[in-house]
Image (spheres, coloured by chain):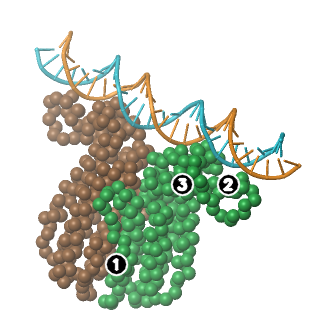
Chain colours: A brown, B green, C cyan, D orange
Amino acid sequence: MGEIELTGATLSRPKHARRKQARPGEILQAALDVFLEHGYAASRVSDIASRAGVTKGTVYLYFDDKERLFEAVVRETLGAMMLRGHALAQAFKGTAVELLSNVLAHWWNEIVLHEKISALPRLMIAEARNFPRLAQFYHGSVIAPARSLLKEVLERGVRSGEFRPVDVECTIHFIIAPFLYQQSMQHSLVPAVPGMMLGTENFLNAFTDHLLHALAARPV
Amino acid sequence: MGEIELTGATLSRPKHARRKQARPGEILQAALDVFLEHGYAASRVSDIASRAGVTKGTVYLYFDDKERLFEAVVRETLGAMMLRGHALAQAFKGTAVELLSNVLAHWWNEIVLHEKISALPRLMIAEARNFPRLAQFYHGSVIAPARSLLKEVLERGVRSGEFRPVDVECTIHFIIAPFLYQQSMQHSLVPAVPGMMLGTENFLNAFTDHLLHALAARPV
DNA sequence: TCAATAAATAACCCGCAGGTCATTTACCGA
DNA sequence: TCGGTAAATGACCTGCGGGTTATTTATTGA
């Protein structure tokens, strides 16, 4: 049984108790890795345990059952995701073009390029039917806020005359989709198909350019 | 045990043999429904059987095991998908703008709006990691051809001056993504989240408009 | 009417993975 | 050094579902 990294403050007094405090986090980390790799059903609790450097019994010491563990994993990761999203709400200054560019860059850098978080959409797409509660939570916490943010940006741009009048609901879809698709592929087909690789270097620039041309009221 | 619909020619002589001939198709139909609804792991062979109006043993009379059955289902549905795609190859006439519009309309009407076929991408995203062979087959039969078709269209448009010079690889991504995202959501979150509904009426028009503005060399 | 044969069944087997619990191990305070 | 206590273990139980097969049911040709 190998060494285990500890997280959190290095208060080195109650060594035993520290472990108890650190365990849930370690297990959640391991569970996230395994769930992302194999999906819910194909992940064995014993695998998660051994990846956390622990046995199965220990997992059930901290989580009621596999389903609760899964929910905890998603909620935890979603929490991190939302924290990052909060920074966006404060960015509401400047022109709509600048704002849209910032939002795109933020999503790309903080979410799509984030190793763990970027894997969530694929997991949700895969498991939503079997975990409707989680799906609702995901929708309310991620999708709906993102859409409403984009809606504000687009409507502001149209009002100010920077953007031509478009079908806002549809356009939101066209903006979100490339990000989601990128992430889904990156964590499903790409690992399975040897030759496949999605170009990432130019994505952000190309997409910003693409969108601004699609939306521009006057030629750029 | 309800009545079962028969398919194919109504040659009513060898009634017994007709059943044997029809069974695989009936089972594949049922299997497709169940797999699409629950994913691979959560689908029980006995459920598939009973949906086909048959018992589990009968399924194993025609398919070696659950995995082969799953592969057969995907290959079958993919076959239908590719047949529909073939019509596209012959459409290579007219301007790039017309061509692109036709391709978009074709994909929308024949694939996204097709009840069964539209559910495949979500299933592949969900199961690709656990079935790499299927993923490769899917990539070779669907994704790669679609990308190469779009590449031709875009490059022709750029050459003819209809489209401004863009990053072709990225743009292909931006075109495919909204379709895939629409389909994935339609078969994952939408059934799980009561209030959720994706607008479909204006999708094709809005997207065509969106793309043509994004690509246009001169203001439209 | 009656074998012959093919299709379908349903009872059966069994291994795997989720979940439990008595026992062991490690720490701490006295 | 030594109880007391909390964490961790791993052997164990159990049900579910994939896969098998002896038996039954239906069809056909004579």
* Left or right: A64, with D20 as reference point: left
Dividing the picture into quarters, in which one does residue B197 lie? Answer: bottom left
Q: Give the number of the mark in front: 2 or 3.
A: 2
Q: Give the number of the mark in front: 1 or 2.
A: 2
Tell me the element at label 2: helix
Residue nearer the viewer, B45 or B169? B45
Looking at the image, is D8 positioned above or below residue B97? above
Is label 3 on the same chain as label 1? yes
Going by the numbered disc 1, the residue's amino acid type is Ala
Is label 2 on the same chain as label 3? yes
User: The residue marked by circle 1 belongs to what chain?
Assistant: B
Is label 1 on the same chain as label 2? yes
Tell me the element at label 1: helix
Residue on which disc 3 sits: B30
Residue A147 visible in the snapshot: yes
Looking at the image, is B158 positioned above or below residue A58? below
Dividing the picture into quarters, in which one does residue C20 lie? Answer: top left
Say which mark, if any, is on residue B206.
Answer: 1
Say which mark, if any, is on residue B19.
Answer: 2
Going by the numbered disc 3, the residue's amino acid type is Ala
Residue nearer the viewer, B33 or C24? B33
Callout 2 crowding tier (Cα within 10 Å): few <14, some 14–19, many ≥20: some
